[in-house]
Amino acid sequence: MWGLVPLFWPLLKPAGAGEILAHRMAWSLVFVAAALLSVRRWAWAGELLRQPRKLGLVTVAAAVITVNWGVYIWAVNSGHVVEASLGYFINPLVTIAMGVLLLGERLRPVQWAAVGTGFAAVVVLTVGYGRPPWVSLSLAFSFAVYGLVKKKVNLGGVESLAAETAVQFLPAAGFLLWLSARGDLTFATEGAGHAALLAATGLVTAVPLVCFGAAAIRVPLSTLGLLQYLAPVFQFLLGVLWFDEAMPPERWAGFALVWVALTLLTWDALRTARRNAQALRAAGDGRSGGGVPRGLDRPVRVEP
C-alpha cells in the first residue's frame, strides 16, 4: 500500500499540496479516533497528558512527520517520484549515521562501508541533478528524526498516530478555514467525488500503519525490515515506468551505489541476527547442561 501511494496523490488535483496535507492531517485524526472508540482504547491518553516530556516529544514527532508528508505530497504531484523513492532508500543509512552522531553507537566495518557508499551515492546524484537531491534528503532526515522521537515516546502505532494528528488537527483546520476565506479551498467546489477522495486521505494514511502494527507483532524483525524495502522499490518503478521520469546514466549510477549500500547493510544485519541466535541457543544449551560454555558467561548483547 505504501508503495502504491504515489498513484493516489495526483487524483486529488486541483487541490494543492498544502490543502492535501491539511486534509490528511485532519481526516487521519477522524479515522484513528473512530478506530480507538470502537476498541475502547483510551487509557493511554490520560497517561500521556500527565507526562509533559512525552507530550513534548509527541509534538516534535507531529511537526517532523508534517514536514515529511508535505514534502512527499509535493514531490509526487510535481514530478519527483523517483527522487522521493530515493529518500526512503537512503533512510536506513541516515538512521544509522544519526545513531553514531547522536547516540554514540558503534558501527561494524560493513556498516561503515554501507554508510560511506551511501554518502558517495549522494555526491554522484548531486552531480547528476546539478544540485543536492534535497527532496530525498528532506524525506530521509525527517523520517529518521521521526523514528528517533517515536522510539523515545514508545506508544503503539494507532495510539501514536492519534496523538500526533491531535496535535496537527488545529493547525490543519485553521489552514483549511484560511483557504476557504480566500476562496481557494477545493473541498466544496470540485464535486462530491473530489471531497470523498480528500476525506479518504485519512484511510490512506492510517490503514497501512494499522497493518504494519499488526505485522510487527507477528513477523520476525529481520523479515519486517526487508519488507520495508518494497515501498521505495514500487515507488521507483512507478516513477520510471508509470510517470515516465527521466533516468540519465548518472542517476542510475547514484541509485546503483545506494542499492549496493543497502545490500551490504541487509547482509550484515542478517549475518549478525544469525550469529546472535546461535549464541543464544548455545547459552541455553550450556545452562541446561549444568554449565556455561567459555566465552558465554556474560549476557549476550543482541545487536539491532
Image (spheres, rainbow, N blue to C red):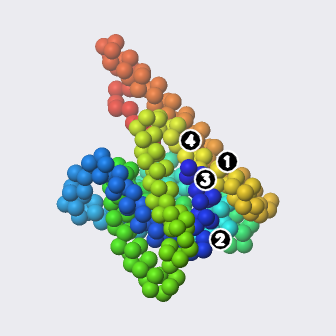
Amino acid type at image mark 3:
Leu
Q: Name the residue under label 4.
A: 226
- Residue farthest to the front? 192
Q: Position of residue 60 (x, y in %)?
A: 37, 66
Question: Pointer 4: residues within 10 angstroms few (<14), some, or many (20+)?
Answer: few
Question: Pointer 2: residues within 10 angstroms few (<14), some, or many (20+)?
Answer: few
Question: In the rendered view, would you say 257 is above or below 291?
Answer: below
Q: How far apart are marks 3 and 1 (CA)?
A: 24 Å
The disc, 3 or 1, on the residue closer to the chain's N-terminal end is 3
Nearer the viewer's eye, disc 1 or disc 2? 2
38 or 56, which lies in front?
38
Q: Name the residue under label 2.
A: 78
Q: Distance between the residues labelled 4 and 1?
A: 15 Å
Q: Is residue 50 visible?
A: yes
Numbered disc 4: secondary structure: helix
Q: Name the residue under label 1.
A: 260
Numbered disc 3: secondary structure: loop
Q: Position of residue 156 (x, y in %)?
A: 35, 49
